[in-house]
Amino acid sequence: MLGRHVFMEGLLANGVTAIFGNPGTTENPLLESLADYPQLPYYVALQESIATCAANYYSQATNSPSLVNLHVAPGLGNAIGMMFGALKACSPVLITAGQQDTRMRLREPLLSHDLVAMAKPVTKWSGEPRHADEIAPMLREAIRIAMTPPRGPVFMSMPVDVFSAETSVTDVRPDVKVRLPSADAAQLEQLVALLKRSRSPAIVAGDDVVVFGGASALISVAEATRATVYQEGLRVHTTFPNRHPCFGGRIPFEASSIRSLLRKHDLVFLIGGPFFEEIWYDPGHALPDVPLIRLEQSPERVNRNFVPTLGICADIGATLETLRQRLGTPTPLPDGSAYLEALETRLQKAWSSVPMTTIRAMHELALALPDDAIVVDESITAYPDVAAAFNFAAPHGYYGARGGGIGQGVAGAIGVQAAHPGRKVVTISGDGSAMYSIQALWSAARHAMPILFVILANREYRVLKHNLDIYRARFGAVSNRPYPHMDLNTPAVDFVQTAQGHGIEGTRVDTPEAIGPAVRAALATGRPHLLELVIAGK
């Protein structure tokens, strides 16, 4: 069997259901094989970073490995920023790049480089088969590593001659999946005792709560213990309903602010995350001096950054389900009306502002979208307004970006729509972020994906202005100086024309009253559409 056929069979056997890529000459072994494997759809991107980000979000949305195919050294270089995002998101993406014929290695052929070394810093594992006999075992090993918690991207170089050669090593069966058991009896006894003893517990829920099936049980655990549940500052998933009475919002990005938030609690329970991703340096630990419980899917995370009072490495979903049963039926909770009243107060204050504010714009957008719409969010500074306007009640209704690199939302929507073809996908992005991956509009048009691209056009890098304000306050800089190179209004990007140039229609909206009709008209077409919302800046 040819090496390229072994590779394709291995993808199917190991649960890969989609390929994202930007074609190139050294990828011909894979491209030549696509016609023989119609069950593996290939989503085309105009640039490698778009394909990588789409694959990242597809894996998060399907909870399965995906494949992204890049083009030699420059293509891999283009993708590295989005590979970093996939690494931070613990996304099990198999990243491949075509490599020149190994028989030319010493001649330094065009576009060749040490791809394994290039990929290594932003992946869990990186390798290159030197013979077709290595393709099957190397592919199995790569996917095993990608799917082993904490999950993450892996890289495999694809020399054109190796993948075009014959091999008799064709065993592509996946390794036996070993799932961790629930916590043992002694750990559960201690866990239950600590939670029952606490009068004001805090739970910080990471993405692995969703990845490993613990979201539903977590709600019952929070209700039974009256815990306040927080989400990470940057996250992929909705780990807890944002309008539940136990919801406490998201964790800040500085140790002092995290400490201040959690100090009112007498116990902290960390579940399924890296904890914590800080932006600014503060002395001291982020956690107050209270008992700490940590439940993780992998042993390397249990003691990371903090030494817990009780550290448990066990299946998160199974452990939370057992904990739900041990804690018993919760008593009724308040209906959360205080949250809605506070939201209404904020909304009314901003109701008539000109230009419109993001909270008013998100309110109108949420009203116009179907209840089961999926939000792919890269609103950044507008995130509090997105969280206020939308009811994110269950997993897989929201996908965010990790790692801090911008441009993920517009490209990620391609992967989410591929994973959820029967649901409406809307991505909300700032204008500066959108321009990092605007070519994704073409992919949506190419594959007839009815995504609604919502661009919040304030003609600035607003997050950079906020961070410069913080820098000036922290480091004693002059605070009344202008913001250098952070405005995008000279010239202003015309997103409607940009959309048309990529094959989709667009609408510019300047007033909140026009948002609902524009959204409904876009949805009625059944085609991708861009909505440019002109909003107030800083």
Image: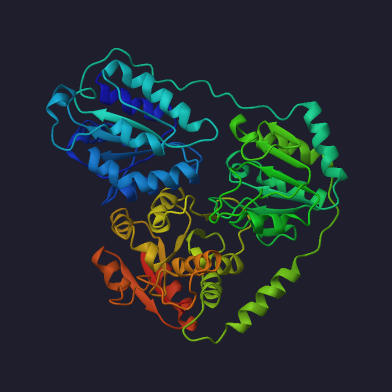
Question: Where 497 sits versus 398, above or below?
Answer: below
Asked if residue 106 lies left or right of residue 451, the reply is left
Which residue reaches farthest top?
Answer: 168
Judge whether residue 241 can be spotted in this image: no
Q: How many labels were placed on the picture?
A: 0
- Residue at x 50% of width, y 59% of height: 375
Question: Where 151 sits versus 249, above or below?
Answer: above
Question: Quick one: 267 or 136, which is closer to the camera?
Answer: 267
Asked if residue 364 lies left or right of residue 534, the reply is right
- Residue 464 quadrant: bottom left
Q: Position of residue 416 (x, y in %)?
A: 44, 51
Q: Position of residue 477 (x, y in %)?
A: 49, 69
- Residue at x 35% of width, y 70% of height: 485
Question: Quick one: 82 or 17, which is closer to the camera?
Answer: 82
Judge whether residue 470 can be spotted in this image: yes
Asked which colour scheme the image uses, the reply is: rainbow
Question: Quick one: 216 or 100, which is closer to the camera?
Answer: 100
Quarter of the image with the N terminus in it: top left
- Residue 256 quadrant: bottom right
Question: Where 293 sits versus 166, above or below?
Answer: below
Question: Where 500 sits versus 46, above or below?
Answer: below
Q: Position of residue 24 (x, y in %)?
A: 20, 41
- Residue at x 39% of width, y 37% of height: 121
